Image (cartoon, rainbow, N blue to C red):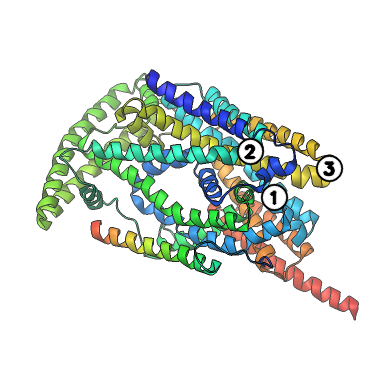
Amino acid sequence: MNSIDWIILFTTLALIVAYGTWKSRGSKDIDGYLLGNKSLPWWNVCLSIMATQASAITFLSTPGQAYEDGMRFLQFYFGLPLAMVILSITAVPLYHKLKVYTAYEYLETRFDLKTRSLAAFFFLMLRGLSVGITIYAPSLILSTILDWNINLTTIFIGSLVMIYTVSGGTKAVSMTQKYQLTIIMAGMIIAGLTAFKKLPNDITFTEAFQLAGEMGKMNLINLSFDLSDRYNIWSGLIGGLFLFLSYFGADQSQVGRYLGGKSVTESRLGLLFNGLLKVPMQFVILYIGILVFVFYQFNQAPVFHNQSLKDKAMQTEYAGAITKLESEYNKVFIDKKLEAENLIGAIRQDNPALIEQSRQSIERIQQSEKVIRSQVKEQIATAIPGANTLDKDYVFITFVMTYLPHGLIGLLLAVVFSAAMSSTASELNALASTTTVDIYKRSINPKAEDYHYVTASKWFTAGWAVFGMLFASIANQAENLIQFVNIVGSIFYGTILGIFLSAFYLKYIKSNAIFFAAIIAEGVIVYCYFFTKIAFLLYNIIGCLIVVVLGFIFQYFENQKIKKASQ
Amino acid sequence: MVDEIEPKPPIFAKWRNWYWFVMLVLAAQILVYLFITNLFQ
């Protein structure tokens, strides 16, 4: 990092905050503050939705995912366009027609107040905890890379977001997100092109594809139906559809984005264009990871990508063992580079026998690399007990910091900060909307002036931001909190999805049936968490199914009771 | 449950065509990705 990088980084961040605050000034009524006066055109709705979903971890982790595991992660997003179509048909016109501020408000129209409050409470629990992690996860990586104090990094990101979300509400969130996403995509594409330009021997774009393919990284589609395999086309289409239906249909941080659309048409087009663009965007991000992978076939990759953690381990008695392993790793690289060059030569000659021979050699070398890397990780884990030796999330950012020219480093860091800010802003805005509209205005203080609710929303936004930052500081001390938050998400998501699915599609189920079904479903999920070994990702499906099935059963008995009473 | 007055979509005559378009683009992408997988893997 030099002064150009710092100037670019801080100017970009300052401009975003200033622009968001200035552009959204004067939101004095609740419509303006929580819905942005429903003034957004479709393209802004689309960018806002995409920026909300793409957190900093998406940009740090996804290229690393492709680097380690190939491009098969792309299949995870195949259910998203289908979810966009379904929500455009059902949720969008319904939410617009009822003129709701939050998704949970609709549940009172469809069921009753207690179901609305229950769903809002579940949402506040899951999103309230996750906002801390949305700030914490990138802070951890950025503080390591920039050598900043983790708590200061957390406060820095949290405070920047707080300034414009508190002052401008939804409008500020959406206004800033269009620029944040533009910076993010421009930065990522420039990083990808730089990685490509740094490849030796005039390797073409297709050859980079071929080389990655020969090394097993172009595993885009897996047609086999295997429940134990996390990424195949079926789990992407079916599992992804359910996941994205609940995320975009029942999670206020996304619903709030398309509720800000000018009309049903603008909100719908925003969602549909997200469906058109999301998969190619993920393809581009994953392919950047592949380019970094190909780049490291010709350039020495670090034996461990989290340099800061490795430096700490080097100050212990394990330094000798790590250095020895590192020099072995460097020797292996010389062979790998030679074989990679042979492979490119074989590809150019279109010689299948030579290609196969080089491929097998590279596979063997990669295996030895893997063994050395895992030995280094073991040494680091022993040297620093409790340290997280997963370095996948550091692959891309370490590449950026080491190989990108000055100026671009600043831009790419601005990308990561922007992504962290855009997703946090949507979460804070959604938490404040839900607390104000579904809890405070509905059940605590229903008769105040409009201006009072704007002030209350601002306080709730600030309150949730402070809560997020505090939670992030605790997360720093207890690493397993991240896992806990993911589990909390799964504990509540399934039930919320079950309530909304029943609300949209199962007219038979009425208020009392759904309310008690949701409470029992939540009880069963909590039981599963404490007393069974069921994978927590399955809680989403189990919770949703219990709500729907019990909802039907309870409604059947209630109908029978009503029938008997009327006879 | 849809608005009583369905807003007219841009470009296409009906919203249904938009939905088919999004799904067709997804299908086309899957075919391209399948082709890339088979070509390079």
Q: Residues within 10 Å of mark 3 (few under 14, many from 20)?
A: few
Residue position for label 1: A102
> What mark, if any, has residue A444 been given in the picture?
3
Answer yes or no: are tags 2 and 1 on the same subunit.
Answer: yes
Percent of width and height locating residue A526: 65, 51
- Amino acid beneath label 1: Thr
Mark 1 and mark 2 in contact (Cβ < 8 Å)?
A: no
The residue lying furthest to the bottom in this view is: A567
For label 2, the crowd category at 10 Å Cα-Cα, with few meaning under 14, some 14 to 19 and many 20 or more, is many
Q: Cα distance, mark 3 to mark 1?
A: 17 Å
State left or right for residue A90 relative to residue A308.
Answer: right
Q: Position of residue A2 (x, y in %)?
A: 37, 19
Q: Which quadrant holds residue B30?
A: bottom left
The mark that comes first in sequence, 2 or 1, is: 1
Foreground: B39 or A529? B39
Q: Considering only order in the chain, which callout, 2 or 3, is on the residue closer to the N terminus?
A: 2
Amino acid type at circle 2 is Leu
Instruction: Chain letter for mark 3, please.
Output: A
Closer to the camera in the image, A282 or A26? A26
**Crowd tier of the residue under label 1, counting other residues whose Cα lies within 10 Å: few below 14, some 14–19, many 20 or above:** many
Mark drawn on residue A428: 2
Dot 3 or dot 1: first in sequence order is 1
Q: Secondary structure at mark 1?
A: loop
Q: Residue at x 20, y 42 (%)?
A: A365
